Structures are given as structure tokens and as C-alpha cells.
Amino acid sequence: MLNMKELREMARQLGVRSIRIPKADLIRAIQRAEGNFDCYGTATEEECDQEECLWREDCFMESVAEENR
């Protein structure tokens, strides 16, 4: 998984504002800028049809963490 510095660089290259944005929101903004579904952290029961997603594994962990909050 990319750290925040790497995420911000990726966002910058895509023209996405990245300052003071939580990690999950930044990843969703990157997903939108790439023309993908902005679904990071929304998978339920580890089900997702986006097999090639760069964020897939981290997304599942984020989804579980969100359910436990």
C-alpha cells in the first residue's frame, strides 16, 4: 500500500487536491480522476467486482475498520 506521501504525489500527477484530505477521501478522489468507481472502503463482506483495483486489499481492511466504528 502506498504511504500518504506517495498518495499525494499520485494525486498531484492527476490534478487532484491532496492537502488536508483524509486518506480514504484522497483515494476516492484519485479513483474518480482515473475514471474508476470511487468505492474505496465500501466493500461489504470482502465482496468486490473490481479485481484489478490498486487499492483492493487495503479497501477490505478499511471496510472492516469502518464497520467496527
Image (spheres, rainbow, N blue to C red):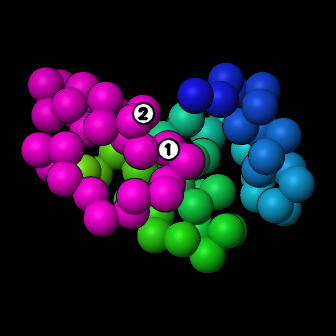
Foreground: 55 or 8? 55
Q: Which residue is denoted by mark 2 in the rendering?
A: 58
**Residue 19 in view (yes/no):** no
Q: Residues within 10 Å of mark 2 (few under 14, many from 20)?
A: few
Query: Going by the image, does 65 lie left or right of 5?
Result: left
**Residue beneath the point at 42% across and 45% down:** 56
- What secondary structure is found at the residue carrying circle 1? loop
Amino acid at circle 2: Asp
The magenta span reads 44-69
Foreground: 27 or 53? 53
Q: Position of residue 2 (x, y in %)?
A: 65, 29
Q: Which residue is denoted by mark 1 in the rendering?
A: 55
Q: Position of residue 62 (x, y in %)?
A: 33, 33
Vertical relation: 63 (above or below) 54:
above
- What secondary structure is found at the residue carrying circle 2? helix
Residue contact between numbered discs 2 and 1, judged by CB atoms under 8 Å: yes
Q: CA distance from mark 2 to mark 1?
A: 6 Å
Q: Residue furthest front?
A: 51
Q: Residues within 10 Å of mark 1 (few under 14, many from 20)?
A: some
Q: Position of residue 23 (x, y in %)?
A: 55, 35
Amino acid at circle 1: Trp
Q: Position of residue 50 (x, y in %)?
A: 39, 62
